[in-house]
Image (spheres, rainbow, N blue to C red):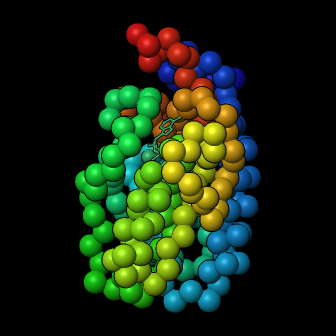
Amino acid sequence: MERHSVLDNDIEEVLVTQEEIDKVTTRIAEEIDRDYASSKRLILLCILKGSVVFMGDLMKKVRIPVEIDFMKVSSYAHETRSSGRIKILLDLNRSDLSQCDILIVEDIIDSGRTLSYLSEYLTLNGAHSVKTCTLLDKPSRREVEFTPDYRGLEIPDKFVVGYGLDYAEQYRALPYIGVLKPEVYSK
Ligand code: IMP
Ligand code: MG
């Protein structure tokens, strides 16, 4: 295991190493460069807080001009299971939405509720286009049908932390993605 901090002790297994994350992020950035080459205003929309690390790396690898923006939604509180309800805590406040190609940048898709809700919300609000990008996907956990336009890696139904992903606001700064020891959240 890549030693990083005392928090390493709570990790059962490293699921995605820093090198793997780097490769996947490079591949997605190349796909974005290709697909949005003729876009007039591409906005990478980071969903706080979990996507902030992925967003930071991805935006540096994308070569076409981009703007960045942020939204914050609640889904998980302090549990490892989704509540099924989405609440917007920080909204997008743009008067130029009809000219924006929005690419929503997410850390992980689980039930699919966050991204399906946000895609519909931004489309209804008149965005020029809306697509979605996720680093991780747990397809076996879907509660609503949803397929992202860009996907880094499929992972099994395990609760993961690191690289932005948290458990009770901890572990976000770990540079890799790891499976949390179940005894940590069943304490
Ligand atoms: P969905 O709306 O159920 O697809 O949930 C997506 C959100 O749930 C993500 O943005 C994460 O914040 C959170 N989430 C889902 N699975 C995990 C996990 O394994 N670790 C940490 N957060 C997770
Ligand atoms: Mg999140």
* Pick the front one: 136 or 20: 136
Residue extending farthest front: 144
Q: Residue at x 34, y 85 (%)?
A: 96
Q: Residue drawn at (44%, 29%), measured in percent from left and top?
A: 80
Image height check: is 123 above or below 171? below
Answer above or below: position of 3 versus 111.
above
Rendering coords of residue 57 (x, y %)? 57, 56
- Left or right: 36 as drawn, with respect to 48: right
Please say whether residue 103 is visible from this viewpoint.
yes
Can residue 175 be seen here? no
Quarter of the figure with the N terminus: top right
- For residue 139, what is the image quadrant? top right
Residue 135 rendering spot, x and y as whole percentages: 60, 51
Residue at 71% from the left image edge and 69% from the top image edge: 30
* Above or below 19: residue 130: below
Whole-percent x, y for residue 175 in the image: 57, 38
Residue at (28%, 83%) from the top-left corner? 95
117 left or right of 150? Answer: left
- Work out whether residue 150 or residue 37 is closer to the camera in this orientation and state it: 150
How many numbered marks appear?
A: 0
Q: Is residue 159 left or right of residue 31?
A: left
Relative to 153, 11 lies left or right: left
Please identify the quadrant where the C terminus is shown: top left
Compared with 172, 97 (above or below) is below
